[in-house]
Image (cartoon, rainbow, N blue to C red):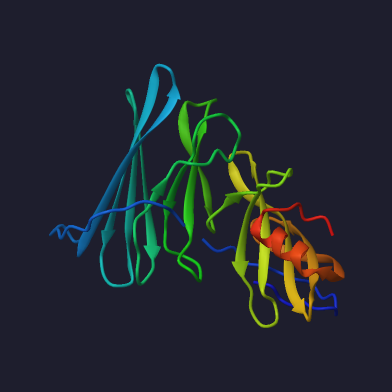
Amino acid sequence: MIKSLHSRKKKMFASVLLSFIATAQATPVSSGCVSTESQSTTIKISPFLNAEIKVTSCNRDAQSGDVNVNIAMDDKKQEFVLPYEASAYSLQIDTSMDLNNDGIPDVEVSNGGGRGGEGTWYWAFDKSNGVFAYLGEAPALRIDSSNSKKIFATVSGSGDVQAVRYNYVVRDLKLVISDAAAFTPTGNSYRVSVMECIATSACRETRVIEKVPALLAQSCMAGTHECKF
């Protein structure tokens, strides 16, 4: 949670939110689930090895349920069971990003968290152990299309703050927030509060930049231009 923004330069804290992509069909079942959704996909690990991934959600009531992620590679099998709390949960799976730059697609599964329901769980292939490692959860992440190619998520702010952009890195096979910027409209420009972050979500304001041109601020939030103010 951001404790305070604006020009008073108080310390700030930001809380991480949590998303995904695909279509699914709900099917009523009787094993303790009100309904289920299932999706599957295949990831090519090497010319001779594929990972078969099946994800199933169990909606236990209108507000919560569990998601079961099964990953099979030859004789190696992994299973992850993760709870979710979301009033309109929809299972989605995506393998379009490579967050740790190892040439192998990562796995993203929606968890319905966050203000817009865009919370996501992430997995990346761990070449050292030959299995998929759980990276953690975050908002719907994107790769910056500017030269920086940073991993980021822009989430809605509160109060006068329009949005906060969080930059992430994969460190020791865990998603970590490296830094953040909060954007407050001020007429035809923006006040930008730049933060450094530690642990998973605690961020501290390091400087405030006034009168950032609106186009530059908006491009930074969208990930289409480097955030050089």
Q: Nearer the viewer, residue 35 or 98?
A: 98
The structure residue drawn at horizontal position 59% and vertical position 44%, both measured from the top left corner, is 174
Looking at the figure, which quarter contains the C terminus? bottom right
Q: Is residue 136 left or right of residue 208?
A: left
Q: Is residue 167 left or right of residue 86?
A: right
Q: Nearer the viewer, residue 70 or 150?
A: 150
The structure residue drawn at horizontal position 44% and vertical position 54%, both measured from the top left corner, is 20
Q: Position of residue 10 (x, y in %)?
A: 82, 76
Q: Quadrant of residue 58?
A: bottom left
Q: Position of residue 187 (x, y in %)?
A: 78, 81
The structure residue drawn at horizontal position 31% and vertical position 41%, both measured from the top left corner, is 40
Furthest residue in direction top, as rendered? 48
Q: Is residue 103 left or right of residue 184?
A: left
Q: Position of residue 189 (x, y in %)?
A: 80, 74
Q: Nearer the viewer, residue 92 or 8?
A: 92
Q: Position of residue 37 (x, y in %)?
A: 26, 54
Q: Quadrant of residue 138?
A: bottom right
22 vs 211: above or below: above
Q: Quadrant of residue 220?
A: bottom right
